[in-house]
Image (tube, coloured by chain):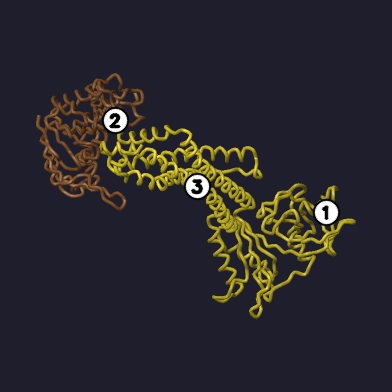
Chain colours: A brown, B yellow
Amino acid sequence: MIRLENITKVYPMGKRELTVLRNVSINIEVGQLVAVMGPSGSGKTTMLNLIGCLDTPTSGSYYLDGNEISRLGGGELARVRGQKIGFVFQTFNLLPRLSALANVELGLKYAGGSDNQRERALAALDRVGLSDRAGHRPTELSGGEQQRVAIARALAKAPPIILADEPTGNLDSRSGEEIISILTSLHAEQGITLLIVTHDFNIAQHCQRIIHLMDGRVESEDKL
Amino acid sequence: MKRLFEPLVTAWVGVATHKLRSFLTILGIVIGVSAVISLMSIGKGASAEILTRIEGMGSDLITITPGAFMFAGVRGALGSTQTLTQQDAEAIEQQVPYISAVAPTYSTSVQVVVGSENMHASVTGVTPAYREIQDLEIAGGSFFTEYDYQRGAKVAVIGSSIKETLFKDTNPLGQQLRAGSNIVRVVGVLATREGMFGFSPDNAILVPLTAVQQMVAQTRTSQGERVVSSIVLTVSDEKQTDYVIEQITSLLRERHRLAPGVDDDFNITSIQEISEAISETTRTLTILLGAIAAISLLVGGIGVMNIMLVSVLERTREIGIRKALGARERDIWGQFLIEAIFLSFAGGIIGVLTGWGASYAISYLGVLGGITTVVSADIVILAVSVSVGIGLFFGFYPAWNASRLNPIEALRAE
């Protein structure tokens, strides 16, 4: 489903260039639950952004469902993001002026919209156990609740892939466990392909596969 | 329906989040639009008033005066030739269609004396039809009659200024005045009226043309026709004014035996022509006023652009989030553009209302010389569409900026 071939990503840093990913090749099958680990600056987030179609590689090819994403333009990338990718960020990234429900609906809207947008958004909120908080704004919710709204937003459009970038990084351990259990159960129940970037071995233990990155290279891989 | 409505709601949320800021931005547009509306309504009101005054003089009036004297390439003053005759007037009345009345006039300057008062004045010989043509109102007594005209009675109808100078507070009716060496009896006083374009009834001394012919030696042309100072006439159908002027021109050229290519030896002016020229001028002035007001609208537009740029900067992260959720460039672009249009359109609507109110207040309070301001639909439509256009124009760049943001960098913004 996700196939990276010799992906290299170079960022210009003033006069010098910073190579973040070097010849990374990875294959992820449909329905896999994968953890990506590695120290800061090892290229985890960059890899996730490439897979999430937020960025394009400097060289190499990226195939998603057999289509070469690395050749697409901005508008097509946006369409793929909207339809196939759900993001969960470390900092939640909810729009502060919108209610929880409106935030979830926004995800559906950019996925192409649907007639029963509101019902689907409510169902997604219900799935993460927040149907009673639909009218609250992010500032009125706890960190764990905000992250659950973010998961609902990613999940509402029923994407084949969810990418979570340190989803528990800003949460206390109890909320973090809740989030992980929601994510893993989504994977188990709906067969969503799930990539989690994390520092936490306890989280990685839940996954089928752990990819270790180091200095922009795949250092090793564990299968559990 | 929902798809149309949703961007508006998004725009409203954006505008409502910063109420004071949005209010000040809108205020810039409000001031611009209301300035355009009120200034143009003043311009339109003024031109309407001038036109009513001119039309009050009779928009059906046509005046024919002799042309300039021309000798060896030297042109004299207008009216210096003696080519226009009483027979011309008769020919026009008989041969040109759409004419309701024609009156030749013959003016002569004499010293007028009443008792110990005297003044130099112009005595004008006219036919009875003159009263109707110039639409003169009588304040006292009556105009001279057809019978007076037939027998060349030495009677006069005088203007109000003449009456005040010569008769002071006494009743002039039935009294005599001496014009040159002739004694003339006053039979009527004209109502006072503001004069325009050379003719003021207040300074007129009108006598039957036949009487003037007895009082002074009226010049004759080589054909023996009696020369007149002017011919005034009214058309029965104002739409035919141009046609009537054309017909009179060809008739007079024929009568005066002017070869093709030779300039007319007479001038024809119609009130309609004058009012057209004046309304052209006032229209230009109105546009000028509007253009000055439009400068403030432009400043308001720059305000919109400024605020939109700030707004894009502030919401960089929001843009990143929307892009991560799958928003295309045109979604982001549209969102900010609609917000800019929303601001300027709101300003436009409020501006129309305040501008309308201001121009109503100007009329109602009677400032600016009691002009009745005119707010017309075209100004309102123009002002509103210009304000929307300003939103489009000045919102374009900030919106484009927003849509081009790199999602990863945008997400990293604080």
- Labels 1 and 2 positioned on one and the same chain: no
Q: Earlier in the sequence, mark 1 or mark 3?
A: 1
At label 1, which amino acid type do we have?
Thr
Residue displayed at 29% across by 32% down = A106
If the image is split into quadrants, where does the N terminus of chain B sit?
A: top left
Q: Residue furthest top?
A: A132
Question: CA separation, marks 1 and 3?
Answer: 58 Å
Q: Position of residue B154 (x, y in %)?
A: 80, 59
**Distance from the alpha carbon under mark 1 to that under mark 2:** 95 Å
Question: Which of pointers 1 and 3 indicates the residue nearer the eye?
Answer: 3
Left/right of residue B90 with respect to residue B115 in the rendered view = left
**Mark 3: few, some, or many residues within 10 Å (few <14, many ≥20)?**
some
Q: Position of residue A170 (x, y in %)?
A: 29, 28
Residues at marks 3 and 2, CA–CA distance in whole angstroms: 40 Å
Q: Is residue B225 above or below residue B368?
A: below
Foreground mark, 3 or 2, reads: 2
Subunit that carries the residue with mark 1: B
Could you say which disc has been placed on residue B165 in the image?
A: 1
Where is mark 3, residue-wise? B299
Element on which disc 2 rests: loop
- Evaluate whether label 3 is on the same chain as label 2: no
Residue position marked by numbered label 2 in the rendering? A92
- Visible in this render: residue A79? no
- Amino acid type assigned to the residue bearing label 3 in the image: Val
